[in-house]
């Protein structure tokens, strides 16, 4: 679920805009999931491919998803066959901080304490009392006696707790499926096209300093992450099984508390981001860049292949819906 908006600064800011995670769907309550769901293991194909076409030119899109069973092995003969005949592979949308390797090294001393709350505050100090009361039993269940996490910013503490909860449930956000796709692309020597945008930083040292001193409006991110672990673990298992079997309809039928948007907003609305002119409207710019690359690829190639998170495909304002509005035919997998 988590991506890092400032990898070059090593800030490890959790940003989920471009992660391959569940897409929030208006549907039945997550509590309808069957209790004690047994996770599918062994080799699984995942969903079929979306077909985007104009005339004889086709872009095939594979929907990535997480969390998935830790012991599941993915293999899709359909993906392997499509990649083998493709002339181009589009990487997923995203954003990369542009500061340079050597310049980034000079910032390393300033990274000490970057995950801590300003002025030595603890979670008890900055969270509403009812939210902190919900945190304590979940922390005890998933993290044990980790006193150090009490001084971390809520957005980082939430990320650590969520990953621990997934692990206990036999689920993982690891990129095993993505790594397998990349290996197939390399095997067939398919041209790979970067679609991510580059974010310029006027003054990386000042951005780092601003981040360490400023508070984040990340209580909503923390609260909704707790809600996921309180109410949604079994539904996560159902969705993981549905993806493994290629049952997109089942994924659509399960809603859940969406912490992703709240965590994104905590990062993108922070003062240190507002002070960077090149970091505005990141989500829209990332989508626009991917759509432009997709249109170029369809126009230039008989067959192209791309991967998107299901959130980008099925969620509100989906990427393929945007292509359909521009005159492309979009066919969903059966």
Image: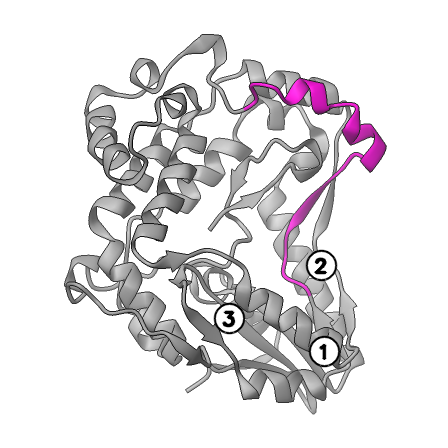
| Label 3 SS | strand
| Residue 205 part of the magenta-drawn span | no
Q: What coloring was used for the rendering? A: one colour
Give the mark nearer the N terminus: 2 vs 3: 3
Label 3 sits on residue: 63
> In this rendering, would 211 be left or right of 37?
right
Instruction: Point out the stretch of residues depicted in magenta.
Output: 91-114
What residue is at 65 percent from the left and 33 percent from the top?
A: 10
Give residue 298's mark.
1
Specify whether residue 107 is painted magenta: yes
Location of mark 2 (residue): 195
What separation in Å lies between label 2 and label 3 (alpha carbons)? 16 Å
Snapshot quadrant of residue 72: bottom left
Residue 16 coordinates in the image, percent (x, y)? 50, 47
Tell me which numbered mark, 2 or 1, is placed earlier along the sequence.
2
**Residue at image x 66%, y 56%?**
288
Q: Secondary structure at mark 1?
A: helix
Residue 70 is drawn in which quadrant? bottom left
Using the rendered image of the protein, determine whether residue 129 is visible from the camera's viewpoint. yes
Circle 2 or circle 1, nearest the eye: 2
Q: Residue at x 40, y 31 (%)?
A: 157
Task: Pinpoint residue 208: horizontal percent, then vertical percent.
Answer: 66, 22
Using the rendered image of the protein, determine whether residue 322 is visible from the camera's viewpoint: no
The secondary element bearing badge 2 is classed as loop
Can you say which quadrant of the picture contains the C terminus? bottom left
Q: Alpha-carbon neighbours of circle 1 within 10 Å: few (<14), some, or many (≥20)?
A: many
Closer mark to the observer between disc 3 and disc 1: 3
Please state which of residues 87 and 150 is positioned toward the viewer in this rendering.
150
């Amino acid at each position: 679920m988590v991506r890092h908006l400032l990898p070059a600064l090593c800030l490890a800011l959790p940003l989920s805009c471009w992660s391959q995670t569940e897409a929030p769907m208006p549907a039945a309550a997550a509590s309808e999931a069957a209790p004690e769901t047994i996770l599918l293991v062994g080799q699984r194909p995942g969903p079929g491919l979306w077909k985007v076409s104009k005339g004889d030119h086709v872009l095939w899109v594979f929907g990535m998803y997480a969390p998935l069973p830790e012991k599941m092995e993915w293999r899709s003969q359909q993906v392997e066959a499509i990649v083998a005949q493709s002339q181009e592979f589009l990487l997923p949308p995203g954003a990369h901080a542009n500061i340079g390797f050597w310049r980034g090294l000079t910032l390393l001393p300033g990274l000490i304490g970057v995950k801590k709350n300003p002025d030595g505050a603890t979670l008890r100090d900055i969270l509403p009392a009812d939210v902190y009361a919900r945190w304590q039993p979940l922390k005890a269940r998933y993290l044990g006696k980790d006193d150090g996490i009490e001084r971390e910013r809520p957005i980082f503490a939430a990320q650590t707790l969520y990953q621990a909860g997934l692990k206990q449930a036999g689920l993982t956000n690891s990129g095993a499926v993505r790594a397998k796709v990349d290996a197939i692309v390399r095997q067939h020597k398919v041209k790979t096209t970067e679609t991510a945008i580059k974010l310029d930083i006027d003054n990386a040292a000042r951005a780092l300093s601003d981040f360490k001193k400023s508070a984040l409006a990340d209580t909503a991110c923390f609260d909704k992450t707790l809600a996921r672990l309180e109410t949604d673990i079994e539904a996560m298992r159902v969705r993981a099984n549905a993806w493994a079997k290629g049952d997109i309809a089942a994924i659509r039928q399960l809603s859940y508390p969406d912490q992703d948007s709240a965590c994104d907003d905590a990062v993108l609305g922070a003062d240190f981001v507002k002070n960077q002119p090149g970091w505005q409207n990141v989500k829209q710019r990332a989508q626009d860049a991917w759509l432009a690359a997709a249109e170029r690829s369809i126009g230039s190639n008989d067959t192209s292949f791309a991967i998107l998170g299901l959130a980008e495909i099925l969620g509100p304002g989906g990427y393929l819906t945007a292509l359909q509005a521009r005159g492309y035919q979009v066919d969903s997998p059966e």
